[in-house]
Amino acid sequence: MKIGRLNHVGVAVPNIAEAIKTYAELYGATQATEILDFEHLGVRVAFVTLENSQIELLEPFGADSPVHKFLERNPKGGQHHLCFEVADIIAARDHMVAAGATVLGTGEPYIGAHGVPVIFIHPKNSHGQLIELMQEPTR
């Protein structure tokens, strides 16, 4: 198993609309998706599109959201995770488990904000960095 392209950097923010405005006004990154609610995942999401990747803005959707817990520790927000594409999410998951990594949640892939299966690898396995692996989207 080998990770592929960096798909996006996840950034937790207390206010997603303000974050979209900041990326547009300060950095000239004016292409952003509409804000979508993923209540079952506990987040509101928008993607800021760059030439070579995306920034996934994450705002908590309720107090049970993992992003809410992140913002309790980092009130102004910050980098939440890195997301890499993989050719086969099941093979990637099996490789992670065999290598001794902790796959968060049930260990089963679920459909993420891009509409493809994803898993998350515990930060303890990647020097403190939460890693999302996602099935390569069809382009």
Image: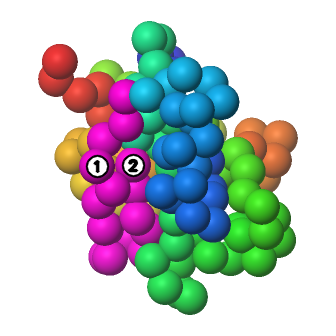
**Circle on res. 46:** 2
Q: Is residue 74 left or right of residue 21?
A: right
Amino acid type at mark 2:
Ala
Q: Marks 1 and 2: in contact by CB < 8 Å?
A: yes
Q: How is the image coloured?
A: rainbow
Between 18 and 50, the one lying in front of the other is 18
Does residue 109 lie above or below 104 as drawn? above
Residue 96 rendering spot, x and y as whole percentages: 54, 41
Most extreme residue toward the front is 25
Q: Is residue 54 magenta?
A: no
- Quarter of the image for residue 42 reads bottom left
- At x 52%, y 32%, the residue is 24
**Circle on res. 44:** none
Residues drawn in magenta: 31-46
SS for callout 1: loop
- At x 68%, y 76%, the residue is 69
Q: Is residue 48 left or right of residue 25?
A: left
